[in-house]
Amino acid sequence: MELVKPEIGLVFWMLLAFMLLLFVLRKFAWKPIMGMLHDREDSIDEALNMANKAREEMKELKFSNETLLHQAKEERDSILREARKIKDSIIEESKLKAKEEAQRIVEAAKESIQYEKLSAMTELKNQIAQLSIEIAEKVIMKELSEPEKQKALIETLMKDIKLN
Amino acid sequence: MRIKYLITLIALWLSFCISAVANTNESEPETKGPEKFNAGKMIVEHIVDNHEWHIATLGETPIAIPLPIILWDNGKFECFLSSNFDHHTKIYKGYKLETEGEHKGKIVKLAADGVSVDKEAALPLDLSITKNVVSIFFTVAMLCLIFISVARRFKRNPNSAPKGLQSMMEPLILFVRDDIVKPSIGEKRYKKYMPFLLTLFFFILFNNLLGLIPLIPGGANVTGNIAVTLVLALFTFFITSFSANRQYWAHIVNAPGVPWWLKFPIPLMPIVELIGVITKPFVLMVRLFANIMAGHIIVLGFMSLIFIFGSMSLVAGYGVSVVSIAFAIFMGLLELLVAFIQAYVFTLLSALYIGMASEEHHQHEEIIH
């Protein structure tokens, strides 16, 4: 029976001790501990949230970077394509121009050659005419140096006139 | 829980066996003298409270730490050391430690002749610092020391990872908070009850564990003492009652969904409900007390077996000691588990009762209308 009969003295001391323990621990231990645990949980939560947010941002940033890069590449490609096109067209054009110029030059050369040839021919003709005249003069002078020959000539000339 | 019942059964069986063996020994004519081993007596002496802290008995002389005795008798205090009784043998200032009878282990007042016990007079109110009281004080001091230093560490490094003692206690604190109190009481109101439930949990756990250590300052059977569990259960009872809301009391006086004739001429349901209110802390008290006491009894029983067999023959004693110690170690390990489980169960049920009493439920009102 003595096992199940609570003793007053022990009940008294137990009550006192437990109340004291409750008071002391509540004031000096549980309050700060619970508060700090709560704070720490909050800060951990916050840190995790922030990390998540940062990760999202990074993802977004990466995505935008990628699109930017893509765009830049495309732009570069298009610029290159255009430049090539322009280059080709310039080359084509200049080739054409050069051909035209060459043609023109050749034409002009031909013309001037023709002209030169013509003038040379005229001069030649003139000289030949001069020479022929001089020769004819000399021949005539020689032919007409004698009076019979002059008479003969006048006679022939007279004959022609008669005919006319 | 089934294991627990099994252990209690074994404990009962064992204590019966031992007392049977002891009784047969007692019934024999006393040939070997008064120092014959009595297992039942030894076990009970070890699990009840004591006015001195007995360490060992060398030959005939017991070695014990004397503890202060405080008596409130006839309107005045009497204080002296228990060594004045000289281990139950001497009378001091007209008081004596009774060794047998219904007041066994209590301090009784002697009649005017100074020899016989005063049967008429009431027992003096015994407020002595007994073995259990010292043990409780020790636990209180230890808990204060541990948790205040943990709190200091928390304050000093608020947002760092736990370290040292803190990392040992923090999981337990979080366990009490997240697995016991929060689900039982609810997110909204649990904070108010945390100090009590944490104190309760650690007080029970530390006392349970200290009780498993056979050396001083452990070894006292604090949580296996009904006075201690009574106080703890009373705390739960009063906190439950004071935190109860209107619905809780209304539910007791006028249980909804019950035919009126169960309440009106004879208040049958209110009586049943009221008994239920008292049963809850009562069961708390008995469960912890019985579990811890049973554990102590079993281990002591195994130890007693060695001496019982030893008193038959020396060889049998040594032979049994191997088995006994193996079983005692097994029991010790089991008791480690029980120490934790009982602290957990007591705290969990306290939290549940508080949660039930302060719960805001609306469906019952609907039934009333």
Image: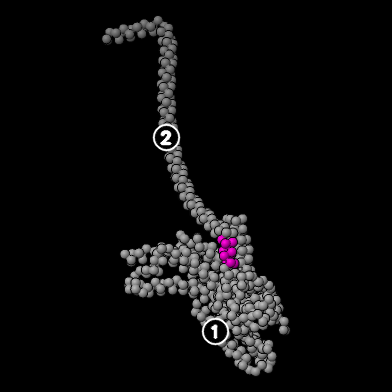
| Residue that label 1 marks | B12
Tell me the number on the disc at residue A35: none
Residue located at (60% from left, 77% from top): B123
Q: Which residue is mark 2?
A: A93
Q: Nearer the viewer, residue B91 or B163?
A: B91
Q: How is the image coloured?
A: one colour
The quadrant of the picture occupied by the C terminus of chain B is: bottom left
- Kindly identify the residue that appears in the image at 44 percent across and 32 percent down: A98
* Residue B167 seen in render: no
Question: Which three-letter amino acid code belongs to the residue tagged 1?
Answer: Leu
Which residue is more in the foreground, B218 or A142?
B218
Instruction: Note whether residue B130 is visible.
Output: yes
Whether residue B288 appears in magenta in the rendering, the answer is: no
- Please give the chain letter of the residue carrying mark 1: B
Residue stretch rendered in magenta on the structure: A16-26
Label the magenta part by its dominant secondary structure: helix
Expressed as whole percent of the image width and height from the top left, the position of residue B111 reads 64, 80
Identify residue type, mark 2.
Glu
Q: Secondary structure at mark 1?
A: helix
Q: Residues within 10 Å of mark 1 (few under 14, many from 20)?
A: some
Is label 2 on the same chain as label 1?
no
